[in-house]
Image (tube, grey):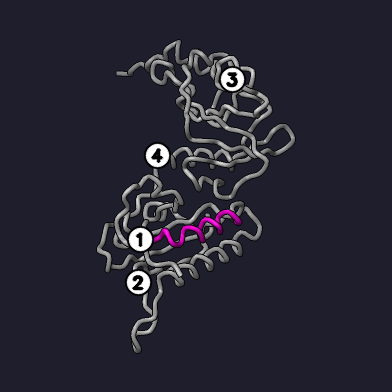
């Protein structure tokens, strides 16, 4: 016996047809002013849609709000905030008519606007994200709720190499997707025990010279680890690792970084312990 296909509600059909806003869309400044989302258009603020496309066109019974974030045009990108390196702040390029402009997006505050308020409003046609930046924007939004979860003790020990990694990312932001790290054991350990760490510097194969840049970054990170975590032991023992053992640090193409790798490796976020008020464990003394 054939079954009839459930009828789509009129509300859902109408909403899908009338809602042109999608993730990454910029609300026209005139509409943003009407809705009191921005106060001064001369400040070059942008109201950017962050709700997923599917939820944008869902019925307002199922998804009553469209969420947005405030962006602001800036003079230049800061490498510390490109490619989703920082979960609280993103620097990204928008196409504005025939030119490319740099925009800073802050994760907070995030605004929830009733869908019915936005009916009939189309995105600002002068702003657009290219495919690569649209993917970056989407990944950054997910990273807000999918943060690096390495053991606290390891994060404390790695604090002495943060500056080197941050500087390398800043200089080479256009060529790198990110720094990815794997550790063993994946648990808290005692102060005399050692973590084994493996690092991949994942580079963008679409950027000419990115491989060489990633290899240089990997060399700098490796040198910093050796400086901070290698020590000369008693005669006959040779050079030993203390606190953290870097088993490997290598450049890797984005085309070679597999789905299995994403399940094993954590993306290295440089603000991972910013909320810790009472860190435990000792930090190796810096030279």
Residue interval drawn in magenta: 157-172
Upstream in sequence: badge 1 or badge 2: 1
The residue at which mark 2 appears reads as: 242
- SS of the residue under disc 4: loop
User: Above or below — where is 281 with respect to 269?
Assistant: below
Give residue 183's mark: 1
Upstream in sequence: badge 1 or badge 4: 4
Q: Quadrant of the N terminus?
A: top left
User: Mark 1–mark 4 contact, CB under 8 Å?
Assistant: no
Residue furthest to the top: 10
The residue at which mark 3 appears reads as: 32
| Residue 282, position as x, y percentages in the image | 32, 62
Q: For label 3, count other residues whose C-alpha is less than 10 Å away and answer few (under 14), some (14-19) or many (20+).
A: some
The residue at which mark 4 appears reads as: 145
Residue furthest to the left: 190
- SS of the residue under disc 2: loop
Residue at 37% x, 78% y: name it. Answer: 240
Q: Magenta stretch: residue 162 in it?
A: yes
**In front of the other: 217 or 17:** 217
Q: Distance between the Cα atoms at labels 1 and 3?
A: 46 Å
Give left or right: position of 38 versus 240.
right
User: Residue 134, located in which quarter of the rendered image?
Assistant: top right
- SS of the residue under disc 1: strand
Upstream in sequence: badge 3 or badge 2: 3
User: Above or below — where is 124 with respect to 96?
Assistant: above
Q: Is residue 204 visible?
A: no
Give residue 64's mark: none
Give left or right: position of 274 versus 76.
left
Q: For label 2, count other residues whose C-alpha is less than 10 Å away and answer few (under 14), some (14-19) or many (20+).
A: some
Residue furthest to the right: 98
Secondary structure predominantly adopted by residues drawn in magenta:
helix
Upstream in sequence: badge 3 or badge 4: 3
């Amino acid at each position: 016996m054939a079954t009839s296909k459930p009828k789509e509600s009129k509300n859902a059909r109408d909403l899908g047809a009338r809602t042109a806003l999608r993730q990454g869309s910029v609300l026209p400044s005139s509409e943003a002013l009407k809705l009191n989302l921005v106060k001064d258009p001369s400040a070059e603020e942008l109201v950017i849609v962050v709700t997923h496309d599917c939820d944008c066109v869902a019925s307002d019974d199922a998804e009553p709000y469209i969420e947005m974030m405030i962006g602001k045009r800036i003079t230049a990108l800061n490498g510390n905030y490109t490619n989703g390196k920082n979960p609280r702040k993103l620097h990204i390029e928008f196409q504005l008519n025939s030119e490319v402009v740099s925009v800073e997006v802050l994760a907070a505050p995030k605004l929830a606007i009733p869908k019915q308020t936005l009916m009939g409003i189309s995105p600002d046609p002068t702003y657009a994200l290219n495919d690569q930046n649209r993917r970056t924007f989407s990944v950054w939004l997910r990273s807000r709720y999918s943060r690096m979860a390495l053991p606290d003790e390891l994060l404390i020990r790695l604090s002495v190499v943060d500056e080197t990694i941050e500087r390398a990312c800043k200089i080479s932001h256009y060529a790198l997707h990110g720094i990815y790290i794997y550790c063993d054991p994946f648990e808290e350990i005692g102060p005399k025990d050692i973590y084994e760490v493996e690092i991949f510097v994942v580079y963008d194969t679409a950027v000419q010279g990115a491989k060489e840049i990633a290899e240089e970054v990997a060399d700098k990170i490796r040198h910093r680890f050796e400086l901070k975590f290698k020590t000369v032991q008693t005669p006959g023992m040779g050079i030993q690792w203390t606190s953290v053992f870097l088993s490997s640090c290598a450049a890797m193409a984005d085309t070679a970084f597999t789905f299995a790798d994403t399940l094993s490796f954590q993306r290295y976020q440089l603000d991972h312990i910013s909320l810790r008020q009472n860190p435990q464990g000792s930090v190796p003394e810096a030279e």
